[in-house]
């Protein structure tokens, strides 16, 4: 079943089409470092974008991070994601893995990624290979380094804005003198900056353009082939920073400077492109990324601007450190939600049958919403990605078993609610309230089950390797004695609609 695009997706697509119509057959202007006005434009229109050249980063850290990338690639830990865009399943050209705080997740393009935990203090993570453990430790080390650098960059940006000067360069080389906070900042500013740089995950990316001959062309500026289309990074804490470490796999002797005779950006070199969202007046930027360069998107840049990644010739890795908005995206959160739903269990029989503590509509409605949340935001998201996470660690195996067991009890809870709705002698007003409180969630459950089942059977899903093939889980056949309700809820939804009509005056 095709998913209806959200209002936000429709608005975004409409803006894109309007912009392309305005352009007709012309390209918008963009600048590269070869252009005289490049740095001035960057300073004026993109001051919250900071580049730190590779020579500014400690050599030992370069070696460790680049080895960690190669280790994870060697062990097959990075995967192309089967994402959902405007109701269509697409396989990303970029392979990815999420590393971060244990129990954290990050959602993009309707896909929830689950962290391979980095070894923070108190973590009990076990890795399949010692080399994978070392790699995760290295990305935690890089994370700490980038946090310090981000705070420094935020301090410099704040100092620049406070003094209303343009003295702080946006491109920082190894000899750039760093500026301290000084006495003009109070404790609140310092805490706020630390929070904006409190990276809890990094999304690692890899792509070899030589194996991706069908990359899209950049549509607005004529910048060439894109590895990642124009976008804002999703699901981040408001005004938080993003830090990116870039590693293209050419040797130093193969790196070449831009050919001054070449118009536009050098297609052999990876670039990151920036533009002001939906602005056709301000030139875009195409910034070359050499081996070990880092760039930082500070404050609200990610909200007001869009960026894309423009493919070069060599394979490239990147580590993109983010402050993921995890208020509804941690294992701790969803376990607590499940406990809330299960508080309505009065008694549980040996066969699984449940009696309810409360029939209040607000309690029933909340229980069914949590039922949907754990099934579609956690269980189905996890198993749709096959057994990929076992490549690195078994950390998620026990939590997912626990969530599935709690979800199973919620199936019995729903069954108990339906038993009450069908019971003779329930006053019409009470029955109406009960039906109204549960019908929307159960209808949504039926629609989403049908959609997820279809996604798992899709042609593109069937092309994936065995360990990446989507699994439709939980799934059970009609008449399964261990389950109180059928997988297909069509008949139940129809019955509830009929009962609701009967209760209306």
Image (cartoon, rainbow, N blue to C red):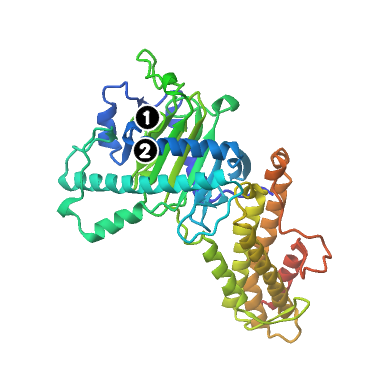
Circle 2 residue? 295
Residue 325 in picture, x, y percent from top left: 45, 56
Circle 1 residue? 287
Viewer-proximal residue among 405 and 38: 405
Q: Which one is earlier in the sequence, the residue at label 2 or at label 1? A: 1
Position of 287 relative to 384 (above/below): above
| Residue at 40% over, 19% down | 256
| Residue at 28% over, 39% down | 47
Instruction: Check the image and name the residue furthest to the top.
Output: 261
Left or right: 32, with 117 as reference point: left
* Quarter occupied by residue 431: bottom right
Number of the front mark, 2 or 1: 2
Position of 469 relative to 290 (above/below): below
Left or right: 215, with 66 as reference point: right
Instruction: Check the image and name the residue furthest to the front.
Output: 130
Viewer-proximal residue among 203 and 27: 203
Res 258 seen here: yes
How far apart marks 2 and 1 lie (CA) works out to 10 Å
Q: Secondary structure at mark 1?
A: strand
Residue 111 in picture, x, y percent from top left: 57, 49
Position of 61 relative to 189 (above/below): above
């Amino acid at each position: 079943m095709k998913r209806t695009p959200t209002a936000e997706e429709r608005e975004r697509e409409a803006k894109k089409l309007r912009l392309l119509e305005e352009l007709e057959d012309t390209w918008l202007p963009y600048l590269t470092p070869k252009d005289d006005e490049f740095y001035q434009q960057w300073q004026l229109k993109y001051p919250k974008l900071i580049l730190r050249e590779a020579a500014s980063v400690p050599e030992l850290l370069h070696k460790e991070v680049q080895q960690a990338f190669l280790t994870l690639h060697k062990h097959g830990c990075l995967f192309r994601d089967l994402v959902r865009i405007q109701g269509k399943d697409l396989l990303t050209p970029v392979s990815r893995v999420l590393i971060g705080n244990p129990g954290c997740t990050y959602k993009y393009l309707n896909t929830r990624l689950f962290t391979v935990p980095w070894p923070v203090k108190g973590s009990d993570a076990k890795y399949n290979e010692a080399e994978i453990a070392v790699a995760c430790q290295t990305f935690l080390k890089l994370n700490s380094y980038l946090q310090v650098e981000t705070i420094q960059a935020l301090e410099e940006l704040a100092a620049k804005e406070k003094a209303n000067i343009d003295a702080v360069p946006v491109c920082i080389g190894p000899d750039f003198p760093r500026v301290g906070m000084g006495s003009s900042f109070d404790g609140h500013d310092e805490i706020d900056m630390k929070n904006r740089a409190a990276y809890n995950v990094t999304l690692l990316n890899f792509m070899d353009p030589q194996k991706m001959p069908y990359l899209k062309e950049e549509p607005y500026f004529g910048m060439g082939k894109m590895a990642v289309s124009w976008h804002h990074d999703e699901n981040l804490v408001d005004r938080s920073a993003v830090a990116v470490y870039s590693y293209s796999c050419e040797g130093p002797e193969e790196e070449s400077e831009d050919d001054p005779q070449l118009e536009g950006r050098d297609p052999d070199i990876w670039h990151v492109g920036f533009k002001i969202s939906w602005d056709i007046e301000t030139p875009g930027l195409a910034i070359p990324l050499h081996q070990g360069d880092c760039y930082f998107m500070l404050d609200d840049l990610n909200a007001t601007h869009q960026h894309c990644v423009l493919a070069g010739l060599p394979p490239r890795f990147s580590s993109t450190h983010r402050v993921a908005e995890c208020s509804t995206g941690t294992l701790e959160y969803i376990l607590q939600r499940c406990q809330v739903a299960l508080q309505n269990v009065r008694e549980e029989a040996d066969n699984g049958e449940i009696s309810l503590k409360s029939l209040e509509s607000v309690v029933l409605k909340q229980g069914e919403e949590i039922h949907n949340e754990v099934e579609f935001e956690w269980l189905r998201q996890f198993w749709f990605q096959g057994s990929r996470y076992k490549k690195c660690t078994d950390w998620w195996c026990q939590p997912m078993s626990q969530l599935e067991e709690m979800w199973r009890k919620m199936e019995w809870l729903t069954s108990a609610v339906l038993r009450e709705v069908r019971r003779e002698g329930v006053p019409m007003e009470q029955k109406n309230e009960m039906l109204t409180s549960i019908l929307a969630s159960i209808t949504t459950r039926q629609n989403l089950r049908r959609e997820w089942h279809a996604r798992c059977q899709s042609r593109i899903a069937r092309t994936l390797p065995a360990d990446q093939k989507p699994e439709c889980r939980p799934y059970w056949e009609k008449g399964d004695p261990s389950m109180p309700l059928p997988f297909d809820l069509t008949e139940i939804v129809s019955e509830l609609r009929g009962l609701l009509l009967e209760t209306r005056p």
